[in-house]
Amino acid sequence: MEMYAQVLNYTMPIFLLLILLEQLAGWRMGRQVSRSLDSVSSISSGMTNVIKDVLGLTISLLTYHWLVEHVAIFEIKATWLTYAVTFVVIDFKGYWVHRWEHRINLLWNRHVIHHSSEEFNLSCALRQTVSTVFDYFAFLLLPAALLGVPVEVIAVVAPIHLFVQFWYHTRLIGRMGFLEHIIVTPSHHRVHHAINPIYMDRNFSQIFIVWDRLFGTFQEELEEVPCVYGITRPARTWNPLKINFQHFWLLLKDAYHTRQWKDKLRIWLMPTGWRPEDVKMRYPVYAIDRPETYTKYDTPTSPSFNLWAWTQLMVSYGLLIYLFAFIGSIGFALAALYGGFLVLSIYAYTELMDRNPLAWAFELTKSVLGLAIILWLGDWFGASQHVGDWMTALVGGYQVLSVLVVVQFSVRFREEQPSRQSPIHEKSLG
């Protein structure tokens, strides 16, 4: 937990810097690569994910450590070749997990957040799940376990394999020549994120595109079919926590409403999007009709509101850095409380971005919790010892300021005309 937190404190600033550089490059090229609130939502999603991961809130039903201890035939040393082979094995595993997440109803809930952005840029790469409670897929590392690949090799290679998937989430890089036949490129991954019928459920590979070519799931990006990004049932919210559980909530409601016991059970493992016939008739849901005419989800904003949204994001990020820097001395119980406070903060300000009339109440609840923590602990999670009393004063003052600003925005929103949000073109699936 502590080591991974320290690694993230070094890698997260690099990701944010690259996001900024992509934005600057887009401006220089005369291309819009992001929208402010969408980027805030994406980065916020990444923060919720790393909080969950660092706190270890995913249960592995079968661990690689157990596999090595019980099935290893050989015992090999951690050489450069071991690391290289392990990288390929993890990539093969990643292809199949990724493919199943797209094809199985229940597993899609693990992955839908990553596709929920209607932009395609480096920030959307940070949209990662918090809905995964159980990890089912360690058995796919069985070949490595049989060879006796050490646990520490997996521990090093797995995060590297994840981090290097960041770079190809961009529209600013075109075709890459011969590399298109070897590795996953931005062109390949643009296809994967597109909802055009010809692109759906294609290009599942994570590093080596060979898996898609080998297993028949490859699709080239076509100039005559511009990619439209997002999900066919639009999330229509900036709140990453809501997006994480929308699909699961629909499955749960469908399982409850269907009259057939067989359907109540099989809905979870059916192909993604499948719904019982009786439920489709009585409880229709909606999907994008024509991707090429779809209008992206948006909410009215202004320069001052964009600035406030980014301010709330960066304050939360600063507090996250502090948590990860001193998580060992804070301890798990208080770290869990700290993480809960940050998640509530993200929920509150993304509800304001959605113009929820109750956003002020969420902000007030978050701020009251923050002030209560300071009164209970005497400072902000040991800040007087680690950095100085100034941090506690700053955090406490921000709790008061944030409520005042959010209330002001909420009043302004009520006084404005009804939402100028553009209509969403939809069709009934039921």
Image: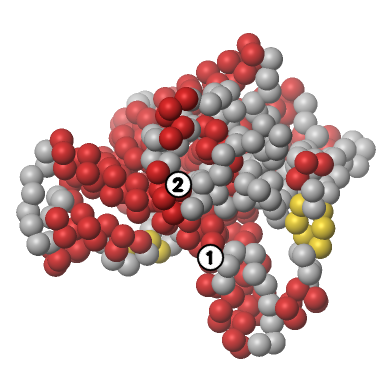
Query: Which residue is at a point 34% across and 47% down the rendered structure image?
Result: 91
Q: Earlier in the sequence, mark 2 or mark 1?
A: 1
Amino acid carrying label 2: it is: Arg
Element assignment for label 2: helix
Element assignment for label 1: loop
State how far apart marks 2 and 1 are (Cα).
21 Å
* Location of residue 374 in the rendering, given as x and y in whole percent from the top left corner: 46, 41
Query: Which residue is at a point 78% across and 41% down the rendered structure image?
Result: 292
Amino acid carrying label 1: it is: Ile
* Residue 388 vs residue 359, the one in the foreground: 359
* Residue 287 vs residue 51, the one in the foreground: 287
Colour setting: secondary structure
Q: What label sits on residue 213 in the rendered view?
A: 2
The C terminus is located in which quarter? bottom right
* Residue 418 vs residue 133, the one in the foreground: 133
* Location of residue 346 in the rendering, given as x and y in whole percent from the top left corner: 58, 43
Answer few, some or many: residues within 10 Å of disc 1's Cα (few below 14, many 20 plus, some between 14 and 19).
some
Answer few, some or many: residues within 10 Å of disc 2's Cα (few below 14, many 20 plus, some between 14 and 19).
some
Looking at the image, can residue 411 be seen? no
On screen, residue 395 versus residue 256, left or right, reads left
Q: How many marks?
A: 2
Query: Which residue is at a point 57% across and 39% down the rendered structure image?
Result: 220
